[in-house]
Amino acid sequence: MIKPIGVFGASLSWQGILDQERVNYELVTAQSNLTRFGAIIIPRRLENKEIFEIKNYLATGGAILTDFLCLKPILLNCNYRPVKFRYIIPTDDAIFYNVGLIDIGQNGFARIGVDNPTIYFESLDKGQVIALPFDLNQVLLNPAAKPKYFYSPAQKFPYETVAEVSRGEIRKLIVNCLRILLQRKNLYYSHIW
């Protein structure tokens, strides 16, 4: 079965990734029938009524993708601290399938008791939650560039100037998160090529 992805409020970054992937998505509100969506992306902090609707959606087997800041009002026991980190190192988890080193180069979040930024992936009631350790809007809108050096037997290493943020790896990470959330609900990740 194929269901659309819901996006809780407009977000250029999240919608940009979904547009690049050509995924069927719709903007949703608290008045929308949330059960008709395969997964819901939450790109902003929610109001109390919206939090209540999302909790009900999760209790009935829903799936959400968000970041730590937006997750905190929904899941009160999700404690994190701001940290500055340069990159996320992929693990053997399915979330990182085909994803290389993710350059972030700015502040993000780490769960309390964990030194490195990790992706929050847990079950909540009957639902699934994935939270990213960074604000996608802030990361993708970062225009900074930096030199990247390459090994060379010459005395001076050659380099090129590249974006500080690895947007392609972030896009792959988002797609993997959506695939996993949908797969857990026995739904297909469908996009047009």
Image (spheres, helix red, strand yellow):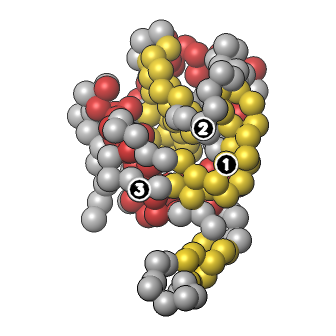
Label 3: element kind: loop
Q: Position of residue 14 (x, y in %)?
A: 56, 52
- The residue that label 1 is drawn on is 85
Q: Position of residue 179 (x, y in %)?
A: 34, 40
Look at 60% across and 36% down and name the residue there.
Answer: 116
- The residue that label 3 is drawn on is 100
Q: Earlier in the sequence, mark 3 or mark 1?
A: 1
- Give the vertical position of 32 relative to 79 (above or below): below
- The residue that label 2 is drawn on is 117
User: Is 89 or 72 nearer to us in this picture?
Assistant: 89
Q: Earlier in the sequence, mark 1 or mark 2?
A: 1
| Viewer can see residue 11 | no
The residues bearing labels 3 and 2 have C-alpha atoms spaced at a distance of 15 Å
The residues bearing labels 1 and 2 have C-alpha atoms spaced at a distance of 8 Å
Q: Amino acid at mark 1?
A: Phe
Q: Position of residue 82 (x, y in %)?
A: 76, 37
Q: Quadrant of the N terminus?
A: top left
Q: Earlier in the sequence, mark 3 or mark 2?
A: 3
CB atoms at circles 3 and 1 under 8 Å apart?
no
- Give the vertical position of 134 relative to 80 (above or below): below
Q: Position of residue 91 (x, y in %)?
A: 40, 40
Location of residue 186 (image quadrant): top left
| Crowd band around label 2 with a 10 angstrom C-alpha radius: few (<14), some (14–19), many (20+) | many
